[in-house]
Amino acid sequence: MNILVVTQYFWPENFRINDLVKGLHERGHTITVLTGVPNYPSGKFFSGYNWFRNIRQNYEGIDVIRVPLVPRGKGGSLRLMLNYFSFAFFASLMGPFLCRGKFDLIFVYEPSPITVGLPAIVLKKIKRAPVMFWVLDLWPESLAATGAIKTKWLLSWVARLVRFIYRRCDRILAPSRAFTARIGAMDVDPGKILYFPNWAEELFQANGETSYQASPVPIPDGFRVMFAGNIGAAQDFGTILSAAEKLKDYTDVHWVIVGDGRMYSWVKQEVERRDLSKTVHMLGRHPLEAMPYFFSQADAMLASLRRALIFSQTIPGKIQSYLAYGKPIIAALEGEGARIVDEAGAGLTCPPENVVGLVNAVLAMYKKPRHERAAMGKRGKEYYAANFERGMLITRLVRWMEELNSAHRLAADRAYR
């Protein structure tokens, strides 16, 4: 098949869509990626890029076409709105001219914002190709839960935009089973909604092997609880830091934070203000290839989200990476994320936004014998192989794509007759 992927984020930005397009390309499909100028998470254009430089590239045999956008800056509300809508505008305007030829299917990757669906709808009309939309962030629910938008009329307007986009998609993929009802509530035919979870890149399954040799920042010896990923409002770092405060007397318990995001500066300031620099270590952003090295240095991996209905229905993408690598998990989650950790027997869970619960979970993991923690990791790895293995999921996705393409062509033939 000839597949057009529409995504605001793509290599050299670190998102799972990079791995997905490689997987589709490896199976013989022709892939074109329509994306923006890379600027996540720093808020500035990556070195070597601007509005007109490197707008056409090749990523491991995959054609990449970039359109201009306003960089996200420091992540303020106005700047993010400009970032989101500038990509939607330029991709809608320029995409039909830059993406030449016919496509069998348009695949949309939406970790946020929902506006990435707008250029796909324009391209659907012009290219006469069906749209498959992978919803990884539910709007307007997540906007309300993080406090990004508090005005009721604006949330209502966003809901109308979401409904407009969903109803024009031919298939919608949901990363957790709990998402399906929320998507269906937007007047979407339940038959169009398919459960399609995240997976972890293959490098997390390499039994700890990595070409990345050393950390640029030394990690102190002791019991290491590691958080890896986006440092944002949804991840509830207030609770994490409060738990770290209560455990300051356990000088051999270290909280290691690998990643970047909108809340990075705030977290760093809070570490200094609370005098936590001896036990909380912020290692910053590192390439995906470095993650197995960092994981190998951890005794337990941490996942957390704020308490909100939408987050209880979400499976944080890091859960699959943690499971695949085989490290025990401490999950300050409820709902789907906690269910998976409990069902797998891969770690300990506690309610979100519960400082005492997180402290107790960390202490319980800290006191467990090494072989018990290893057994948790092994069970997690086995659960991952049975439920989230990359090859299995990409095979499933390709089958759905082929079925949708065939149904679309059959419908078009009937209409022509």
Image (cartoon, rainbow, N blue to C red):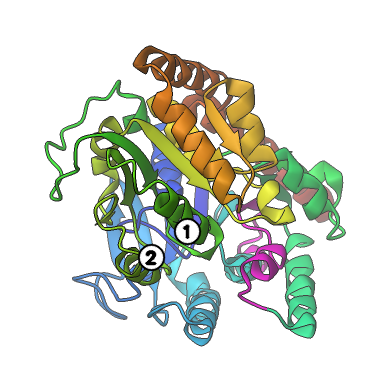
Q: Where, by quadrant of the figure, is residue 158 drawn?
A: bottom right
Q: Secondary structure at mark 1?
A: helix
Q: Secondary structure at mark 2?
A: helix
Residue drawn at x 72%, y 48% as measured from the top left: 171
**Mark closer to the chain start, 1 or 2:** 1
Residue drawn at x 73%, y 39% as measured from the top left: 177
Q: Amino acid at mark 1?
A: Phe
Q: Which mark is residue 138?
A: none
| Magenta-highlighted residues | 124-149
Q: Kindly check if marks 1 and 2 are in contact, taking CB atoms under 8 A apart as contact.
A: yes
Q: Which residue is mark 2?
A: 267
Q: Amino acid at mark 2?
A: Val
Q: Which residue is mark 1?
A: 237
Q: Where, by quadrant of the figure, is residue 34 drawn?
A: bottom left
* Residue 408 visible at all: yes
Judge whether residue 112 is colored magenta. Answer: no
